[in-house]
Amino acid sequence: RAACVPAAPHRGVFVCSRGAVDVKGRSRVTVRSSKQDMTSVTSNSNSSPAGSEAETFVYYASFGSNILAERFNCYLKGGRVEGMIRDMPGSRNKTTPKEWHVWHNLPHRLFFAHSSPTWEGGGVGFVDFYENNDEEGDEVDHLSASRTNTKQQTTLGTSYRLYRITLEQFNDVLAQENGMVPGDGNCQALTSVEARSLARKWNEVVSAKNENGAKHGGMVTACVEGSITRENFVPSTGPRGETRAPSNRWYGYAKCIGTMHGECVLTFTCDPTEMEKFRSGQNATNAPSEAYYDVIKKGLVQTGMSEREAVAYLDERVGTSLIAEGSAPVR
């Protein structure tokens, strides 16, 4: 299939081309399906049936160390991988996912911050969805070029590995990522009703069908005569996220970034208040440790990138300031 690369990002005009993953992140949104022993995309084309969180399926969109399957399994089965200094308790349902997909270079900015005791004091990954505290309403309209079409957004997209798991497992991963055990009442679990509602809202934002079953910000709804314009490019970040863990936790802000075959695609990052501090430079970013960097690199290779592509992808995002051009560099 044709992938989409901007000819001139500052103009917001795109052209279609073919080839490998663009590690420079030229707003090139591609979809890769699971391989080898993973379940075929077409075999799970129906949405999850109504039921409890243990019966509802969603996709968890990982962008940091969980891109490596072995690392992600620590949150399901418990334990640790090389480079970690403590074990994870694991989820109540320890079944590992049989299906995964990749979304490359969505219009979210990946960066590294804080000092993680799990990863030798290095920074860990976060994504900026370009949501602001002063925006009102349930859905953020990102069609305004003045608010969202920054140079970084159009050139430094984020690649996600999507694991199909139960909503209960996602809630358990969310709790563990915030230093809690599965089922902790301080972590507000997403319900199956909420997950289906978020999926419906994305289906309203992106009405066009996609043969890959994907709906997300950055996707192209049509490609007429080789040209992609603002009319068929979807920059929307979709329904607003919600803080689900205490504000002093790093990954308390859960967000639906799209749907796959009608099922909710969920991830988490820091909340908009803290994100604004990172953008302004009030909060410093922090480069990842060698061990954390290496785990993400291996995970990207698992998804189909070459090692050279994975290194280029990470180095550009580690080395480029989150702060607006002309401001202070990454600290």
Image (spheres, rainbow, N blue to C red):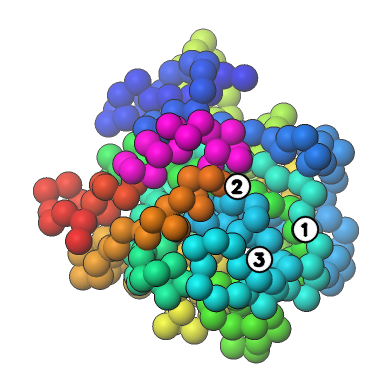
Quadrant where the image shows the C terminus: bottom left
Residue 89 percent coordinates (x, y) = 67, 78
Q: Quadrant of residue 52?
A: bottom right
SS at mark 1 in the image: loop
Residue at horizontal 39 percent and vertical 69 percent from the top: 120
Note whether 90 is above or below 281 in the view shown.
below
Residue 93 percent coordinates (x, y) = 80, 70
Q: Which mark is residue 161?
A: 2
Q: Are marks 1 and 2 in contact (CB under 8 Å)?
A: no
Q: Earlier in the sequence, mark 1 or mark 2?
A: 1
Residue 179 percent coordinates (x, y) = 54, 80
Look at the image and say whether residue 311 sits in the magenta stretch: yes
Rounded to the nearest angstrom, the CA distance separating label 1 from label 3 is 10 Å
Q: Amino acid at mark 2?
A: Arg
Q: Which residues are magenta?
A: 300-316
- Residue beneath label 1, please? 96
Residue at horizontal 36 percent and vertical 59 percent from the top: 288
Q: Is residue 197 visible?
A: no
